[in-house]
Image (spheres, helix red, strand yellow):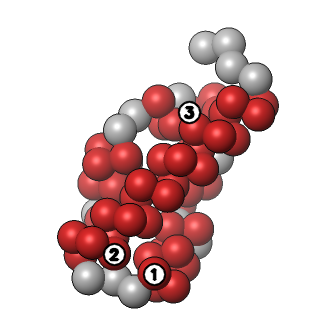
Amino acid sequence: MNISESEFNYVKEHVTAEIIQMLVNEHGYTLEDAVDKVYASKIYEKLSDSRTGLFCQSPRYIMSYLSN
């Protein structure tokens, strides 16, 4: 996929924000705990690597891996 670095960063941060919002709204995390969980996770490492293509997946799909 041909995507610029700025486009990739925008999509990655949007997906990350959606995941954090789901953790807070659906799983009862505090905002701080949700942010910590996401940014410290292995799945965020993969999301941050454009070569994995994970950023193209839905936030709910990615969150299912975060929960496991």
Question: Residue placed at 47% from the left, 30% from the top?
Answer: 56
Report the side of 29 relative to 9 (left or right): left
Question: Residue placed at 56% from the left, 33% from the top?
Answer: 52
SS for dot 1: helix
Residue 24, position as x, y percentages in the image = 33, 75
Q: Are marks 2 and 1 in contact (CB under 8 Å)?
A: yes
SS for dot 3: helix
Q: Are marks 1 and 3 in contact (CB under 8 Å)?
A: no
Task: Please determine whether, in this image, residue 53 is positioned above or below residue 11.
Answer: above
Question: Residue placed at 48% from the left, 47% from the top?
Answer: 15
Q: Amino acid at mark 3?
A: Thr
Q: Which residue is mark 3?
A: 52
Q: Residue furthest top?
A: 2
Q: Amino acid at mark 1?
A: Leu
SS for dot 2: helix
Q: Amino acid at mark 2?
A: Val
Q: Which mark is residue 31?
A: 1
Q: Which residue is mark 2?
A: 24
Neighbor class of circle 3 (other Cα within 10 Å; few <14, some 14-19, many 20+) is: few
Task: Please determine whether, in this image, residue 41 is positioned above or below residue 32.
Answer: above
Question: Which image quarter holds the C terminus?
Answer: bottom left
Front in this rendered view, residue 52 or 9: 9
Q: Residue furthest right?
A: 5
Q: How many marks?
A: 3
Residue 22, position as x, y percentages in the image = 31, 63
Disc on the earlier residue, 1 or 3? 1
Front in this rendered view, residue 21 or 45: 21
Spatial CA distance of label 2 from label 1 is 6 Å
Disc on the earlier residue, 2 or 1? 2
